[in-house]
Amino acid sequence: MNILQALFFPPEQPGGVSSMIPYIQDRFIKLGWQMELFSLPKRVRSKGQEEVQFETFDHTVYSGNTMVDKYIQTYKDYVWWTKMRIKKPYDIIHAHHPIAALVMKQLFPDTPLVVTIHSSYERELILNGKIKEGGPEHLFLMSLYGELEAKADHLLTVSESFRSYIAPHINHPEKIKVIPNGFDEKRFKPISHENAVTQLITVCRLVPAKGLDVLLHACAELKRRGHPFVLHIIGDGPIREELEALAVELDLYDDIIFYGYMLHPEEFMPFFDVFVLPSRAEAFGSVFAEAALCWLALVGTNVGGIAEQIEDGINGLLVPPENPEALAEALEKVVTDPAYRYHLARAGSEKAKKVYSLSRVISQLKKVYVHMKPE
C-alpha cells in the first residue's frame, strides 16, 4: 500500500504533528509499507491562480477580509505546488491540515482521504488576540469543519475534548475516531541527573494562548514564598520581549533563562525536573507526553487534551487556567517535595508509555488504512 502523508508545515518544523509524522513514516517503511511526505515550502507564495470553491459554504462572502484572503491564497498556492510536484497515484492520502486535505480531495477525488484535525487554529487566533470570536475570520474557519466532513472519507482527531469542540459544527461527530498523538520512546527518554535547585522547563511558542504571563506571576509568588528554582523557557514568538520585560518587572530576571527557538528540545528536556505549561486552550498538548517520557513531573491547566493526559495528583497536577495563585501552589508542591515529584514523574512516564507510544499510533493507523484501502 502506498500512502501520502500531506502536511502543511515542512516536517522539520517544530510542533507535535510536524515532528511526529516523519517517525510514523519511518515505522511504516520498516514494516514494508510505502509512505511519502508532502508539504508546502515557505518559499511558495502567491503562485496559485485557480478559483476556489467549497461544497458546503460560500467563502466569497468573506472576500476582502485580510486573513481570509491570505488563507484562500495559501489554498491556491497549495493547489499550484501539488500539481507541480505530485505526478503519481496513491492508494490513500492522509492529510494533517484543512488546506492539505481539501486540496488533495479536489485534485485526487477518487483517492480515499483520511484527515486528522490536530488543533483549533481559530481558537488560538482568538486567544492570541488576532481575531474576534464571532467575527468573519472565526465564522470562516469554523465553516471549514463542515467542509472537511463533506470531503473526507474518514475524520480523525487527537482528543475526546477536541471531538466535543468540533461536534456542533458537523453533522456526524460520532463518526470521528480519536487517535491521540504518539511518541518514540527512543527519542524521548530519561537521563539520570541531580539538580541542587529545582529546574522548571516549558517548551512552546511564545504567544498569549500558552499562558506564560500566568506562569511568570506564579513564579513570582513562588519566589516570594522563599522557594528557589530556575525556569527555562524554550521557544520563540511575538510576545518574547513582553515576557522578558515582565520577568524584570516581577524581579525574576535571575531566575529565568530565555533560550529562543530550539529544533530538538527533547535532547535538553531530560536534565530538568518539572514541566509546566498553563495553556489557555490545547487540543492535545504533545509536549506534555514528551516531557512525561523524559520523567519530568507535569503541571498543566485543566483544559482540552491536557486534562485527558493528566490525572490530578496521580501522574501530574492540574490547575484552573488564568489562576497564578493555584499554579504557584502546585509548583510549590513539586519544588519542595522531591519524593512527591518523583512519584508524579514515574506515574506520568508509565501512562505515556502505555497510552501515547508511537507503536500504539502505528497499530491504530494500520487498522484505519486497511479498512479504507480500495478493493
Image (tube, rainbow, N blue to C red):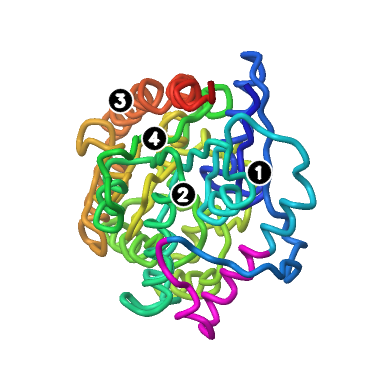
* Numbered circle sitting on residue 151: 2
For residue 251, say whether it is visible.
no
- Residue range in magenta is 56-76
Q: Residues within 10 Å of mark 2 (few under 14, many from 20)?
A: many
Alpha-carbon span between mark 2 and mark 4: 22 Å
Q: Amino acid at mark 3?
A: Ala
Residue 165 image position (x, y, % from top left)? 28, 54
Q: Amino acid at mark 2?
A: Lys
Image point (55%, 38%), residue name: 94
Image point (54%, 69%), residue name: 240
Alpha-carbon span between mark 2 and mark 1: 24 Å
Q: Are marks 4 and 3 in contact (CB under 8 Å)?
A: no
Which is more toward the observer, 99 or 131? 99
Q: In the image, is 4 to the left or to the right of 196? A: right
Q: Amino acid at mark 4?
A: Pro
**Mark with earlier residue (2, 1):** 1
* Numbered circle sitting on residue 180: 4
